[in-house]
Every structure is written in C-alpha cells, then in structure tokens.
C-alpha cells in the first residue's frame, strides 16, 4: 500500500469513528454557521439548481447534498458520494426522513477515482472535503473530469482569517477549545486535533485557486465567508474543452 492509500485509509477510519456525533459537533462547534455556509454554497449556482444533475463529493452525512436537493425541483438529481460507509449510513437515514429519495442518491465513492464518466454532471460540489483528500490535485482533477463543458465546480472549505485579532481568537478556539469539546463528545480527540492541523497546512485560497485554474477551469473565483473562517471556490469547465 502506498502513502496516498495509507493516508486515505486513516482518513476513512477517522470519519467512520466520529460519524455518530459528526452532525451534532458540526453544528455545535460552528455555532450553527455550517448550515449557513452550505446554503451559500448552494447559492453559488447562478440561476439555481433546478433541473441540474449535481455530484456532491465527500458528502459525509449528506448535509450539502440535502441542501442542494431541497433547493432544487423534481427534475434535480443530486448524487452524494463518500468513502466512509458510516457517514453514508447516517446520511441515508436523513435522506429518507426528508423524503428526498427521488432527487438524492447516496453512494460509495472514492474522490480520487470517481466511477462516473467524463462530463456526466452539470455541477460538482465538495464541502469541507478537499482538505481531507490524500492527493488534492488528483481529487480536483477527478471533480473537473466528471463536469460537463459549461458545468460549475463549487468548493466550500475552511481557510484562516487574515485579520490579526480574529486570527488570534480563531487559533485559540480552533487549536484549544474545539479539540477539547470535540474529543469529549466524540470520544476521538485526535479527529478534532486533525481538523485545525489540516486547515493550517492547507493551501491558501489563492494557492487553491491557482491549482483549480491549472486544471484548465475558467472563471475561477473565491468568496470569503464569516471573517474568512471559510470560503467558497467556484470555477467553470470551459465549453470548448475537448
Ligand atoms: C469533514 S467531512 C465533510 C462532510 C460533508 N461534506 C459536510 O459538509 O459535512 C469530510 C468527508 O470527506 C470524506 N473523504 C475524504 N477523502 C475522501 C475520498 N478520497 N473519497 C471519498 N470521501 C472522502 C470523509 O469520509 C468525510 O466524510
């Protein structure tokens, strides 16, 4: 097994272990902001998602996929894919409870080897997922590959605030308080130490934009949210691409 596979397996194990408490902790630790951030990601499709066929990569327990399906119409088709069966199982219960099974399907999916044909989707989304990819460029390439020409990529991801005062408060919360509470509630403190660790090591918004542009995507943009704690990357697959 190579390094990428080992890293992917460790990430899968970690998310599977925290899956039962994942949603609760997400909403609690972000003070409910995560719900608004996902709504903003849905809003990053100009003209809405009605009639669109969208793949939500690394969907976890399905919150973004559900938000997309809710915002759509009966012609909207959302596929949420993740490699953690525990996260998917919780997502499946939520889809059934929401009565959105006709619009939204959850499936096993490896973001580094997406088993969908080139150009299959009008949109591809990923919320708080790309940071966890064992190979970021491969994952981004796969996301671009399955987009139709003219299709839109929307990535919601944590960043680090640029304002010094907010950055200091954020660091204190993110590296001290969050791992403590996350560990207490999930029983896996390591997972909540991993979160700030990966955020601080992750490419800056400019660097990530450059990597997206390098794939040949156009109209690459970034919108910071909530003091730059996170933000939304958007891009379009050019229509003339072969
Ligand atoms: C922080 S969670 C985000 C889940 C969800 N998108 C959300 O907004 O809550 C990250 C997810 O990425 C998934 N993941 C990481 N690498 C993956 C890969 N290579 N293929 C599929 N899923 C992956 C994990 O299993 C986990 O469910």
Image (cartoon, grey):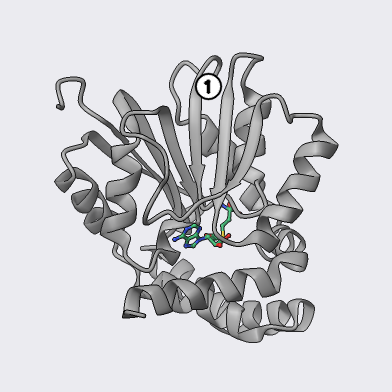
Screen quadrant of the C terminus:
top left
The image quadrant of residue 223 is top left
Measuring 77% from the left and 61% from the top, which residue is drawn there? 24
Screen quadrant of the N terminus:
bottom left
Q: Residue 219 appears at what percent x and percent y?
A: 23, 31
Q: Residues within 10 Å of mark 1 (few under 14, many from 20)?
A: many
Q: State the SS at label 1.
A: loop
Measuring 36% from the left and 34% from the top, which residue is drawn there? 117
Measuring 55% from the left and 47% from the top, which residue is drawn there? 81
Q: Is residue 39 left or right of residue 100?
A: left
Whether residue 117 is visible: yes
- Where 34 sits versus 43, above or below? below
Asked if disc 1 is less than 8 Å from ligand 1, the answer is no
Q: Residue 98 appears at what percent x and percent y?
A: 81, 34
The image quadrant of residue 5 is bottom left
Q: Is residue 7 left or right of residue 119?
A: right
Whether residue 36 is visible: no
Measuring 56% from the left and 16% from the top, which residue is drawn there? 50
Q: Is residue 240 left or right of residue 160?
A: left
- Where 92 sits versus 99, above or below? below
Residue under numbered circle 1: 49
Q: Is residue 165 left or right of residue 35?
A: left
Q: Residue 184 appears at what percent x and percent y?
A: 76, 83
* Residue closest to the eye, 179 or 84: 84
**Count of number-bearing discs:** 1
């Amino acid at each position: 097994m190579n390094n990428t596979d080992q890293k992917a397996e460790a990430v899968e194990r970690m998310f599977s272990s925290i899956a039962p408490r994942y949603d609760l902790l997400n909403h609690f630790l972000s003070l409910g902001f995560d719900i608004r951030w996902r709504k903003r990601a849905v809003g990053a499709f100009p003209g809405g998602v009605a009639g669109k066929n969208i793949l939500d990569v690394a969907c976890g327990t399905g919150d973004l996929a559900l938000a997309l399906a809710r915002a759509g119409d009966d012609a909207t088709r959302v596929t949420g894919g993740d490699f953690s069966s525990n996260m998917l199982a919780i997502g499946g219960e939520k889809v059934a409870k929401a009565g959105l099974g006709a619009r939204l399907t959850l499936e096993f999916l490896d973001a580094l080897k997406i088993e969908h044909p080139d150009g299959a989707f009008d949109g591809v989304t990923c919320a708080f997922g790309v940071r966890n990819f064992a190979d970021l460029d491969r994952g981004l390439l796969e996301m671009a590959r399955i987009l139709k020409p003219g299709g839109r990529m929307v990535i919601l991801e944590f960043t680090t605030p640029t304002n010094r005062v907010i950055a200091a408060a954020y660091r204190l919360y993110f590296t001290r308080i969050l791992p403590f509470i996350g560990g207490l509630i999930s029983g896996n403190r390591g997972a909540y130490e991993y979160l700030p660790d990966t955020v601080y090591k992750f490419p800056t918004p400019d660097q990530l934009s450059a990597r997206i542009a390098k794939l040949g995507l156009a109209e690459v943009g970034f919108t910071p949210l909530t003091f730059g704690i996170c933000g939304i990357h958007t891009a379009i697959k050019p229509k003339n691409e072969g």
